[in-house]
Amino acid sequence: MEKIKFEELNLSKEILKAIEELGYEEATPIQAKTIPIILQGKDIIGQAQTGTGKTAAFGIPTLERIDPSKKTIQALILCPTRELAIQVSEELKKLSKYKKAIGILPIYGGQSIERQIQSLKKGVNIIIGTPGRCIDHIERGTLKLEDIKLFILDEADEMLNMGFIEDIEFILDKTPKDKQTLLFSATMPDPILKLTKKYLKNPEHIKVVHKELTVPTIEQIYFEVKEAHKIEILSRLLDIYNPKLALVFCNTKKKVDEVVSSLQARGYLADALHGDMKQNQRDRVMAKFRSGTIDVLVATDVAARGIDVEDVEIVFNYDVPQDEEYYVHRIGRTGRAGREGKAFTFVSGKDIYKLRDIQRYTKTKIKLQKIPTLHDVEESRTSKIIDRIKESINEGNLEKYSDIIERIIDDEYTSLDVAAALLKIVMSEDKRYDEIEDAFEGTGAEPGMVRLFVNVGKNHKISPRDIVGAIADKVKLPGDLIGRIDIFDKFSFVEVPTDYANEVLDIMKNNTIKGKKVNIEIAKNK
Ligand SMILES: Nc1ncnc2c1ncn2[C@@H]1O[C@H](COP(=O)(O)OP(=O)(O)OP(=O)(O)O)[C@@H](O)[C@H]1O
Ligand SMILES: [Mg+2]
């Protein structure tokens, strides 16, 4: 498709200036195709791949059509999650930087309703909301929709799905008949498409056509993994690829919490996002993820749709998603706006059938890759160190250090000796991998004993003796019955009598060692 400049789209100079500041050089295909039609006042269904700028595709013409001299709500945008409502509202605020008079307000559950009422009273033109909270305001009489010109569903197929459809109909019922309706999503399954006839007038279905439903710049890989090994494999992949940010999807809230504690215990900066958390917690986690204060976000499907965070380099499907559409949306959190990304899916047992359905639905091939071994992790660490050494040599300024080396060489060591010794010192600071492999080799504990894998996390001050002491103390198990296998940077192995194993696991799960929560699980042969 030929490139379309925003200047060709009949936009106001205020909007063009804001677009220029955002650094958008040309309109994306979905923007080029839908903006003119929306400006004409037509109903549309806009379908284009994840991360291709659908927000601005409906956001820009919406801003152009608002009359800010009237203090009424003229556009309502509904989103399936709170995080998405906030994000869409932020993007609209950026686009309206030079149309200051337009009032934009996100309203969503979990936030003080009183505060929202105060803001609504000031006169707002565009509401971006989640359905539940909008209904709440409609019932209180604090959200008046009789002046609505534009009604927009972002993630429209999800909004018209069973979970939301009643809410949507309730809200639609309160809006004027002659409004314009816009539906946007990366996916639009046929049954939902049929349903849209009920809500749209002579709509144009604008589909930015591609052979496949997913973004081609996302490399899609799957690993055959036993359920019990997922956490270890996730850690290895994180170590090898070292993504700036990674998003890990699980199918349940419980699993999200488990994965987060295992990752934290292994020293990763990870946190959770799911629907059981309080809104201020959710906001804090999203902010930390956006700023890179945490680098692994583990989430349920609340984070699957629409969320736009630039540096997400890998998306993990820790569990294969139930719905094919969700695969598309989940992996679409990476590879946005033309960037590259990776999507890694863990497949265990019967999941392979689901994966086939997903490939058929998305018309893509997901490639099987061998699970990285600890040796691979080691290799990747080695090549990273080599790169760093070369970089440092190229940067120069090494005179001070060369002088020291010369002193050693004077003592009859070769420069190769010196270099090798230095490298050994540097690399042994984090040599957990070889040692863990050794310890796992033969997880067979002494007869009558069970070997436990104890994870104390980074920067701890917990010695093996502390671990044995804590178990002895809290489980009332004589210390000499506990065997100590080894201690590593972040890990340790202990052996306890088989009869006590479950009790130790139970009790230690709810206890701390020197004030720190540690992760103890039965060691499994890798
Ligand atoms: N014309 C443009 N040029 C460059 N970047 C753009 C352009 N339009 C939007 N973007 C950027 O592309 C990213 C993705 O946009 P957006 O979130 O709207 O995608 P989307 O199509 O809604 O994806 P999803 O289906 O995942 O919701 C955003 O960071 C946005 O700022
Ligand atoms: Mg979107």
Image (cartoon, grey):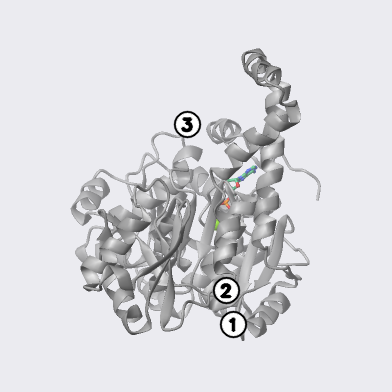
The quarter holding residue 404 reads top right
Q: Residues within 10 Å of mark 1 (few under 14, many from 20)?
A: few
Which numbered tag is attached to residue 98?
A: 3
Q: Nearer the viewer, mark 3 or mark 1?
A: 1
Tell me the residue that label 1 is attached to: 191
User: Does dot 3 land on a helix, a strand or a loop?
Assistant: loop
Ligand 1 within 8 Å, label 2 CB:
no
Q: Amino acid at mark 2?
A: Gly
Tell me the residue that label 2 is attached to: 442
The quarter holding residue 101 reads top left
Q: Position of residue 98 (x, y in %)?
A: 47, 31
Q: Nearer the viewer, mark 1 or mark 2?
A: 2
Q: Amino acid at mark 3?
A: Tyr
Instruction: Tell me which image quadrant ligand 2 sits in.
Output: bottom right
Question: Is residue 362 toward the left or the right of residue 303 in the image?
Answer: right
Instruction: Answer yes or no: is residue 201 visible.
Output: no
Please name whichever residue, 243 or 92, is drawn nearer the observer in this view of the structure. Answer: 243
User: Does dot 1 land on a helix, a strand or a loop?
Assistant: helix
User: Does dot 2 land on a helix, a strand or a loop?
Assistant: loop
Total labels: the figure holds 3
Mark 3 → mark 2, Cα distance in angstroms: 67 Å
Ligand 1 within 8 Å, label 1 CB:
no
Q: For the point 60% across and 32% down, which residue is it?
A: 20
Mark 3 → mark 1, Cα distance in angstroms: 41 Å
For marks 3 and 1 on the same chain, the one whose residue lies earlier in the sequence: 3
**Which residue occupies the extreme right position in the image?**
2
Q: Residues within 10 Å of mark 2 (few under 14, many from 20)?
A: few
Instruction: Answer yes or no: is residue 125 visible.
Output: yes
Q: Amino acid at mark 1?
A: Pro
For marks 3 and 2 on the same chain, the one whose residue lies earlier in the sequence: 3
Quadrant of the frame with the C terminus: bottom right
